[in-house]
Image: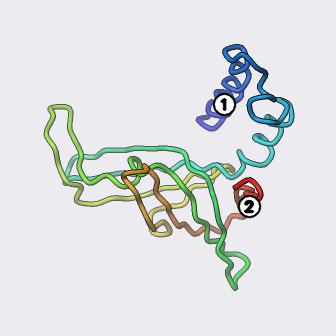
Amino acid sequence: MRKRILSLFLILLLAIVPFFASCSLSDLIGVDYKTLVNTITTEVMPSNVIFKTTYHHYAQVWIYSGSGVIVYEEEQADPTVHVYYALTNNHVVNKTSLEDSHGHTYSPTSVSFEVDDYKGNVTENSDITLVKASANYDLALLRFTTSETLVVTPVSTADL
């Protein structure tokens, strides 16, 4: 459901941008609207994942979630095992302090991750690791293993 809402929000946002700009959307990004929407829905959205991070401080629990995008697949000898790397926000998956409703701050005693892929499959904590995180850029790279074949975001070096 969140993925549909995110998709609809993105499409709606792209639809209203030209009304607030002095030029058309295709002038702004160099691509016509229909091509852009088609590219997003067919190529980019299938590489979207949702990360759910559960932080514990003894009996207290904090749950954060956020979207991410699969950026790389690591080659494996076993074709039934897939190892992916995904980018998400650091503030979702790498909290060092937690605050309760009374303003008290705690350090997490344990952290667990879940990945919900575009197909609705959930990968549990044992197959997910935080590879690298940057608080300055609010980015984190996670590595996860699944039996599902997922889509990696198409990136063209010509666009870099």
* Secondary structure beneath label 1: helix
Disc 1 or 2, which lies upstream in sequence?
A: 1
Q: How is the image coloured?
A: rainbow
Labels 1 and 2 touching (C-beta < 8 A): no
- Say whether residue 113 is left or right of residue 25: left
Under mark 1, the amino acid is Leu
Out of 9 and 52, give the one closest to the viewer.
9
Out of 107 and 149, give the one closest to the viewer.
107
Quadrant containing the N terminus in the rendered view: top right
Out of 106 and 133, give the one closest to the viewer.
133
- Say whether residue 4 is left or right of residue 139: right
**Residue 123 pos. (x, y %):** 54, 60
- Say whether residue 147 is left or right of residue 131: right
Residue matched to label 1 = 10
From this view, report whether residue 1 is shown above or below residue 108. Answer: above
* Mark-to-mark CA distance, 1 and 2: 24 Å
Quadrant containing the C terminus in the rendered view: bottom right
Near mark 2 (Cα within 10 A), the count class, few <14, some 14-19 or many ≥20, is few
**Residue 106 pos. (x, y %):** 17, 49
For the view shown, which residue lies furthest in the bottom direction?
Answer: 77
Residue drawn at x 69%, y 18% as measured from the top left? 21
The image quadrant of residue 67 is top right
**Residue 82 pos. (x, y %):** 66, 71
The image quadrant of residue 65 is top left
**Residue 100 pos. (x, y %):** 20, 37
Residue drawn at x 58%, y 69% as measured from the top left? 145
Residue matched to label 2 = 157
Under mark 2, the amino acid is Thr
> Which numbered disc, 1 or 2, marks the residue closer to the eye?
2
Residue drawn at x 72%, y 47% as measured from the top left? 44
Give the number of callouts. Answer: 2
